[in-house]
Amino acid sequence: MRIYTRTGDKGSTSVIGGRVSKDDVRVEAYGTIDELNAFVGQAAAAVSSLERDSSADWEELAEELAVIQQELFDCGSDLSYANPEPAKLKVTAEMAERLEAWIDRHEAALPPIERFILPGGSEIAALLHVCRTVCRRAERRIVTLAASSQPYPEETLRYINRLSDYFFTAARRANVLLGVPDVEYERGARVFGENRRSQPE
């Protein structure tokens, strides 16, 4: 099987139900999901490199990232429909709910947050923050698709919104597991209550 087809040499590409320009808002949306998946793969590889010395907490994080990579492919698939058919869509409400359960579990092990957090601390946390920011961009691309009056899968938008919260929490959890403090924004005042563990969206 040849990897190249030559069908896109003039700047168009196939979606399920037709062909569009490669810079179409739909292609931008699922293309950004693909980019996000690549960064998740990088973060997962970094976590896996710790597995020989890992605890159950690291194993859980590795398993979560593996599931997320599969589900991001589902998101891209659903976004590639020019006219989404509900019966064929793969992303469900239960997937976002599972992310919420993972977020809650990680948050229970985190120290309260007092200031805004900058990306960094440990290498793994930094990689997860990259995932968070690309995830936010993917969300913006889906919102742009929705604003264009083109049909889009609503559960995918919900999932991606929740996923960015997951990456923020997972990044902080990675720092805790490695014994590395979060990087606080030093020029900011203490803006969060004593029990808060996450930054607002």
Image (spheres, grey):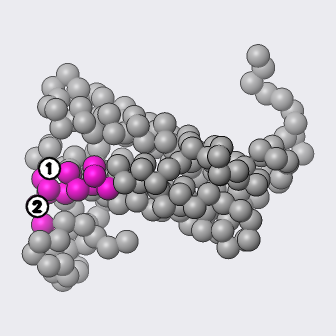
- Magenta residues span 100-113
Amino acid under label 1? Val
Tell me the SS state at disc 2: loop
For the C terminus, the quadrant is bottom left
Tell me the SS state at disc 1: helix
Q: Which residue is mark 1?
A: 176
Instruction: Please give left or right for residue 127 compared with residue 170 in the image.
Output: right
Contact (CB < 8 A) between labels 2 and 1?
yes
The residue at the point 33 percent across, 39 percent down is 64
Earlier sequence position, callout 2 versus callout 1: 2
- Magenta-colored stretch includes residue 108: yes
Residue 11 in view, yes or no: no
Q: Which residue is mark 2?
A: 111
Q: Percent x, y for residue 87?
A: 65, 46
Q: Percent x, y for residue 134?
A: 48, 56
Towards the viewer: 84 or 14: 84
Q: Is residue 101 above or below residue 140?
A: above
Instruction: Please give left or right for residue 136 compared with residue 86 in the image.
Output: left
Q: Is residue 163 above or below residue 141?
A: above
Residue 58 in view, yes or no: yes
Mark 2–mark 1 distance (CA, rounded to whole Å): 9 Å
Amino acid under label 2? Pro
- Residue, far front: 87
